[in-house]
Amino acid sequence: MRTGLVIMGLACALVIAVLVSLVLGKYPVSIEDVCGFFLWKIFNTGVNLSVDRQLLENILLNIRLPRIVAAVFVGASLSISGAAFQAMFLNPLVSPGILGVLAGASFGAALGMILSKSWFFVQASCFVFGFLAVMAAVGVARFYKGNSIILLILGGVISGALFTSLLSIVKYLADPYNQLPAIVYWLMGGLTLADAGTIRGTAIPVVAGVGLIISLSGYLNVLSMGDEEARAMGVPVERIRIVLIVMATMLSAITVVLAGMVGWVGLIIPHISRMIVGPDNRVLIPVSALVGALYLVAVDDVSRLLFTTEIPLGIITSLVGIPFFVVVLKRAGRGWS
């Protein structure tokens, strides 16, 4: 009962946060105009608006709504990936970048910015190299025999270091007047380039990935007991782990496509969620998605409204995440005992 109320409360809070974010911005729009515009758009009702409807359509549908939806996607994807990885690897300090996907996706995006002026090419390169980084980590783990979890994590460290070095090479070779500033700014994280086309292209994989991880969250409880115990209970450990890794990797790569490098979300949000609902992954996974989405929508509002110029999203998440993680780490550890 309490769990259902928590999930419903978080879902309602997310809807309210989205509505508030639609109102907030450099151009003032009232909540009445926002609600009236969507009533007119959906039901074609004759609602009196204080702002021109074409102007409202440009502001709400072409600028603010894609950005807000992107924030929801990024926050939910990073949080649910972090929670899944932490449960799968039995380590509360694991983040979505553990297998090198974020480093690989960042290298792919930077390389795409140098090779092409097409934003679609940059996004595709980002996604492909994110998966290549994870494949490299898995390849290192399969090259040796031993504890597969430890070798997989070490493979991720090696893969991440490799693509971070390659990213440095790309920065060194980039045009210092145009390409390098664009790469550096994009890697700081931000949702300024989110548009309706990008949202449509990423909506299906994000929803599918989040839904599949939630549907498999019960298996994470069993995997947290160890491989031998899970196999004794009839769980196909390797198959479940591969599916979860592929889904979490896909979601992590998509977040880089949408917003660049946004740090600390996938690390601290699962801990906050664990403090709210406990360690049961059947509840923790969906709650992490909701809390992460709510958190990033709020942070994005701060990033675009705090000063006259927009602050990169990754800077704010780091400034908030680092001290907060120091505070909650001790309390969050209770959920692992």
Image (cartoon, grey):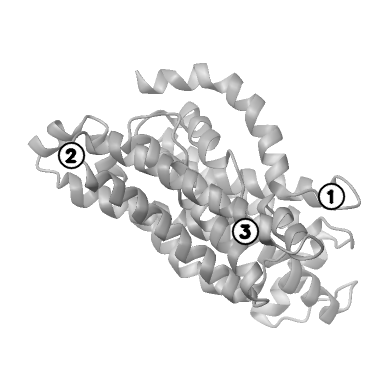
Q: Which residue is mark 3?
A: 170
Residue 67, x across and y down, in percent = 68, 62
Q: Are marks 1 and 2 in contact (CB under 8 Å)?
A: no
Q: Nearer the viewer, residue 328 or 126?
A: 126
Left or right of 258: which side holds 233? left
Q: The residue tagged with tag 2: helix, strand or loop?
A: loop
Q: Nearer the viewer, residue 16 or 141?
A: 141
Identified by mark 1, the residue type is Leu
**76 relative to 149, above or below:** below
State which tag comes first along the sequence, 3 or 1: 3
Q: The residue tagged with tag 1: helix, strand or loop?
A: helix
**195 relative to 213, above or below:** below
Q: Quadrant of the C terminus?
A: top left
Q: Which mark is residue 305?
A: 1
Q: CA distance from mark 3 to mark 1?
A: 32 Å
Which residue appears at 77% of the width and 48% of the height?
303
Residue 202, x across and y down, in percent = 51, 68
Left or right of 128: which side holds 119? right
Q: Which mark is residue 145?
A: 2
Which residue appears at 76% of the width and 73% of the height?
37
Residue 70, x across and y down, in percent = 62, 60
**294 relative to 68, above or below:** above
Q: Nearer the viewer, residue 251 or 121?
A: 121
Identified by mark 3, the residue type is Val
Which residue appears at 49% of the width and 38% of the height?
6
Q: Are marks 2 and 3 in contact (CB under 8 Å)?
A: no
Q: Nearer the viewer, mark 2 or mark 3?
A: 3
